[in-house]
Image (spheres, rainbow, N blue to C red):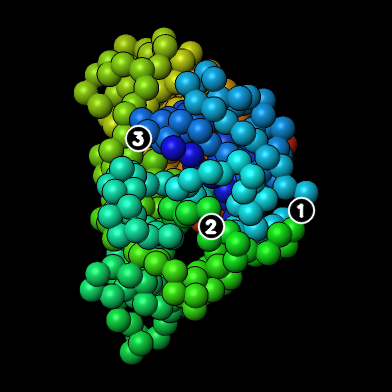
Amino acid sequence: MKAVILVGGQGSRLRPLTCNTPKPMIPLVNQPFLEWMLLRLRDQGINEVVLAVQYLADRFRDALGDGSHLEMKIHIVEEPEPRGTAGAVKNVEHLLDGSTFIFNGDVMTDLDLRAMLDYHRENKSKLTISLTPVEDPTQFGLVETESDGRVRRFLEKPREVDITTNLINAGTYIIEPEIFRYVPPDQFYMFERGLFPVVLQTGDPMFGFPSRAYWTDIGKPQTYLDVHHDILIGKMNYRFRGKEIANRVWLEGDADIHPQAQVVGPVVLGHGVKIARGARVIGPTVIGAGSQIGPDTSLEGAVLWENNQIGEGSVLRNCVLGRANQIGEHCHIIDGAIVSDGCRFGPENRLERSIRIWPGTTLNERAISF
C-alpha cells in the first residue's frame, strides 16, 4: 500500500519554530512529527511513501534517506515550484499504481486507516474523504453526505442558518489513480477548490468516511502546544519511547535528576537531561535531550526541544522553547510564549502573552518585562 504526504509548505503560521526546521520535522514528544507519522503508517500496512516537498527539502533527505531505517521505502520528490495540494500529487503520479492514501503533513490523528480503506473498497469509491465532527462548523468547510455516505456538496464556512452537518474535511484521502486525469499537469491546483468540485460534477463515486478519531492541525503555536498536552494526558493513542521511570514519567536513555528535585507526571524526558536541586517539573511537560534545568526552577505545561539551559529560579509555564537556548536566572516565560533556536536571555526577563522570539535573539538583563 502506498501513500503521499504533502510536506511542501513553509509553516509560516508556526514561525519562528519553523525558521530552521520544516514543519513536519518539528519534534512531537521528542520525536520528529513526520517520523511518528511514518511509523504509524507502517504499523497500519503502508510500506511505501512519497513525500512531496519543497521548503528545506535537504532536511528531509538528511533525516529520512530512503526510509530503510524505518523498514519502509520513501521517495522524496521536490516540486519545481508550489503546485498546491492536488498539483503536488499530480507531480508524483508516475509513482502511483493503485489505491493511494493522501495525507496533509501537519495533521495529527489516530484515524483507523484500515477501516477507512475497507469502507473505500466496499463502496467502490474513487475518492474517499475522512470527516470529523467539530463544535463550531462556521469556522470550517463542511462536507454534506447522503444517507449512504456519498458526498452531496461542500459548504465553505457557512452561516449558522445554513449549517446542515457538523462534519468537516479532516485532511486524509484515499484516491484511485484515474481520478488524477481531472488534475491539470504542471499547475497550481487544489483538492478543496479544484478537484473535489470537479468530481462532484462528473459523478464519479466520492464518499465521506466519518470518524471520531483524534484530529488536530499542529500548524499553529497554540495547537502545537495543545497537542503535546493532549498526548500526555491520554486524549489520543500514543506509544511513548523509552521507559517509565515513575508514575507517568518517561525517560529515553539516561538522566541526572537531583534527589531534591520534584518531577510530577505526565512528563517526558530526553537522553542526558539534568534537573538540579529544588527544581519542580510538573506535567504535562516535555524536556528535550541534553537540556539542563537549573536549581529552584519551575516548569509546568512546557515543551522544550534539545539542549536548552534554564537558569536558577526561572519559571516556564505553557510555553515552547526551540533548540539550544540559554535562559538566564529568574526569567519568566509563560502564557503561550514561543522562543525559537539559539537565543540568549539575561536575567529577569519576562515573556508572556504569546510573544514570539526569533532565532539567535539576545536579550540583556530585564530587556523585556510585561
Q: Secondary structure at mark 3?
A: loop
Residue in the image at 32% along x and 11% along y: 259
Q: Rounded to the nearest whole Å, what is the CA distance between mark 1 and mark 2?
A: 24 Å
Q: Is residue 287 left or right of residue 114?
A: right
Say if mark 1 contacts mark 3, CB within 8 Å: no
Q: Is residue 135 left or right of residue 74?
A: left
Q: Nearer the viewer, mark 1 or mark 2?
A: 2
Residue 319 to residue 138: above or below: above
Q: The disc labelled 3 sits on which kind of residue?
A: Gln
> Can the viewer see residue 85?
yes
Say if mark 3 contacts mark 2, CB within 8 Å: no
- Residue that badge 3 annotates: 44
Q: The disc labelled 2 sits on which kind of residue?
A: Glu
The crowd level at tag 2 (other Cα within 10 Å; few <14, some 14-19, many 20+) is few
Q: Give residue 178's mark.
A: 2
Q: Secondary structure at mark 2?
A: helix
Judging depth in this view, the residue of 343 and 113 nearest the camera is 113
Q: Secondary structure at mark 1?
A: loop
Residue furthest bottom as drawn? 161
Task: Give the x, y percent position of residue 365.
Answer: 66, 38
Q: Rounded to the nearest whole Å, what is the CA distance between mark 3 and mark 2?
A: 24 Å
Residue in the image at 74% along x and 58% along y: 186
Judging depth in this view, the residue of 278 and 21 nearest the camera is 21
Task: Give the x, y percent position of residue 72.
Answer: 50, 26
